[in-house]
Image: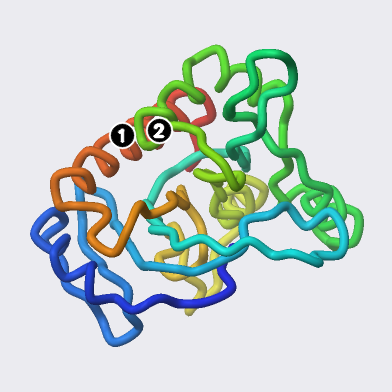
Amino acid sequence: MFGLGRRKDGPLEGLTAVIGGAVGRDGHLSGTAAGRTVEVWLERLDPTPRTGAQFNPTYADVLRIRLSARGATPWHVRSEARLGLGGGHVYEFVREAAPEALRRFSPFPDLVPVQDRGVETQLRDAGLLEAITRVAPPSRLWLPRVRFIPDPRAAMRERMRGVPIPAGVPSGPSTTAEVGLEIDVERAGDADPTPERFAEMLEAAIGVAELNERVSPGA
């Protein structure tokens, strides 16, 4: 979703025991944790927001974690530079025009999930930004960044409740689409993360998913 380039997957071999998985031919480590599917891989990318021409791209090596998760509302959080005397970086919600554009041109606008500022406020009040900090603290380069993408078929099932589902059309949550919780964390070096650090990050990521499901439950 975010990436510009794939990194070698050798460092992932040391993380297999954490999720009882294996590294596939695509370079992705796949397994499970706490009843959730987990997919992990390495990327080299420029995390700079796409707000104009990119004359001086700044690349970073990141670990990307994708975790199955439920929820009704999409959201995107990333590290931002703090304005003012204090400086430093903080987590902030990112608002994008794409969901609204999809609604405008979709023949089924009610089925397109949109960003809900009310839900964002509830997530913030419930401690989402603090939960993300436990995965990794905010830092330079707009990293880490976390995105939740709901499965649109949940909204479709709700919309079409009582309407028979044609044969051959899956009725359960998607297992292949880019849905769920996705986290990009900058790596400190070729040996990062260690299995211990990865286990801590994964536990914290599961906490983020659980918080989201409490505030904005989905099918």
Between the residue at mark 1 and the residue at mark 2, the CA separation in whole angstroms equals 6 Å
Q: Residues within 10 Å of mark 2 (few under 14, many from 20)?
A: many
Q: How many marks?
A: 2
Amino acid at circle 2: Val
**Which image quadrant for residue 2?**
bottom right
Residue at the (21%, 56%) spot, across then down:
32
Q: Secondary structure at mark 2?
A: helix
Residue placed most toward the observer, 176 or 3 = 3
Q: Secondary structure at mark 1?
A: helix
Query: Where residue 65 sits in the image (x, y, percent)?
Result: 38, 55
Residue at the (45%, 43%) spot, across then down:
70
Q: How is the image coloured?
A: rainbow
Query: Where residue 49 sits in the image (x, y, percent)?
Result: 73, 52
Q: In this rendering, is residue 17 above or below 79? A: below
Q: Which mark is residue 163?
A: none
Query: Where residue 105 sits in the image (x, y, percent)?
Result: 90, 61
Query: Where residue 79 sits in the image (x, y, percent)?
Result: 58, 36
Q: Are marks 1 and 2 in contact (CB under 8 Å)?
A: yes
Residue placed most toward the observer, 34 or 200 = 200
Residue furthest bottom as drawn: 25
**Which image quadrant for residue 80?**
top right
Q: In this rendering, is residue 82 above or below 156? A: above
Residue placed most toward the observer, 127 or 43 = 43
Does residue 173 appear left or right of residue 85 in this picture? left
Report which residue position mark 1 lands on.
Answer: 204
Amino acid at circle 1: Ala
Report which residue position mark 2 lands on.
Answer: 208
**Which image quadrant for residue 23?**
bottom left
Residue at the (31%, 34%) spot, across then down:
204
